[in-house]
Image (tube, rainbow, N blue to C red):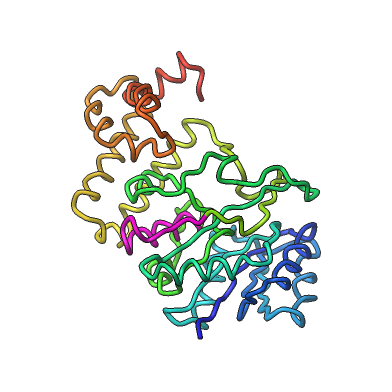
Amino acid sequence: MIKIGIVLATYNGEKYLSQMLDSLLAQTRPADFIVAIDDGSKDDTPNILKGYEGRLPLQVTCLPHNTGHRAAFSKALELAAQQLGEDDLIALADQDDVWLPKKLQILEDAIQKNPEVNLVFGDAQVIDGEGKLLGESWRKMDGVPEHLSLRAILTGFTNVTGCMTLFKAKLLKQVLPIPELAPVHDQWITFCASLEAHDNGVKSISEAVIQYRIHGQNAIGLGDTHTWTGNLKLNLQWAKMVLQTPHFKMLSASDQKFLKRYISYTEDRLHKPFIPQYFFWVIANVASLYPYVKSFTGFLPRILHGIIGAPLIIKFFGKK
């Protein structure tokens, strides 16, 4: 029988953690085990976790110092991997959300119906810090596309939030260890899922599987909190990181060429005022460079915008 393991990383999460753990207790398809890593909390989070050890199949490890969410999830996944076979499944959990009762059941059914898929992810209701419903669909509220191509993922875009996912344990061979320069763990996992089965490795489903809490202190939340140049720098960091990993050699020759060109393009865009030499390349790859845009009329201004560098955009368009 297929096992499902949950990995949870916590840090100073005492305010909402009990609600989250209660929602794990209410699952119609219970997890077989839960690996929880507390990342050096200074509040009552470790005691709350330990208080649930007799009620959930919970395995708690408390780290003495804060290592960051990427490292904490990497450690939790390493511990989970020791208990899972390739056909088993992994769910990621955040400390401040509320899982809807059928989350694991819905996602497990979806991945079993699509055997070629490595990772499935659902939608979410959005709630505030007090649990008030802000919206029925996180995907619609944030304009998140249901599917991204591998090339779009190579440029740093992601449409997957880890707490809404379920993925095959066999992916851990590619996922671990999570690179230190990966901005977030779920972005890296999504890349590995897409790489292993190219554009068919990740599948979205329409059902909401959690209540996604936005409360102003999220490590990662709804919307974009970075500046325009900050996003470019993050995307460049991501692309360079992929280039330096063994995973780069798993890409097709054309995708390798695309990634190298994207790195040169982004470096030039950050430092040069005008880059017309990339005009035809931007046209050829506009769907990968702007995957959230749906129409030709939306693409056209972005093609023109795409050959203007940061110095001019900052000076004349007021972006930072």
Q: How many marks?
A: 0
Please, is residue 82 above or below residue 273 in the view?
Answer: below
Say which residue appears at 68% left-offset and 66% top-offset: 101
Say which residue appears at 69% left-offset and 70% top-offset: 24
Residue 291 at what x, y percent from top left?
A: 40, 39
Q: Say which quarter of the image contains residue 250.
A: bottom left
Q: Say which quarter of the image contains residue 268.
A: top left
Magenta: main secondary structure equals helix
Residue 224 at what x, y percent from top left?
A: 56, 37
Horizontally, residue 292 falls left or right of residue 246, namely right
Say which residue appears at 61% left-offset and 46% top-offset: 137
Q: Is residue 242 magenta?
A: no
Find the residue positioned furthest to the left: 253
Residue 301 at what x, y percent from top left?
A: 37, 21
Q: Which residues are magenta?
A: 186-205
Say which residue appears at 51% left-offset and 58% top-offset: 121
Residue 97 at what x, y percent from top left?
A: 69, 57
Horizontally, residue 92 falls left or right of residue 214, namely left
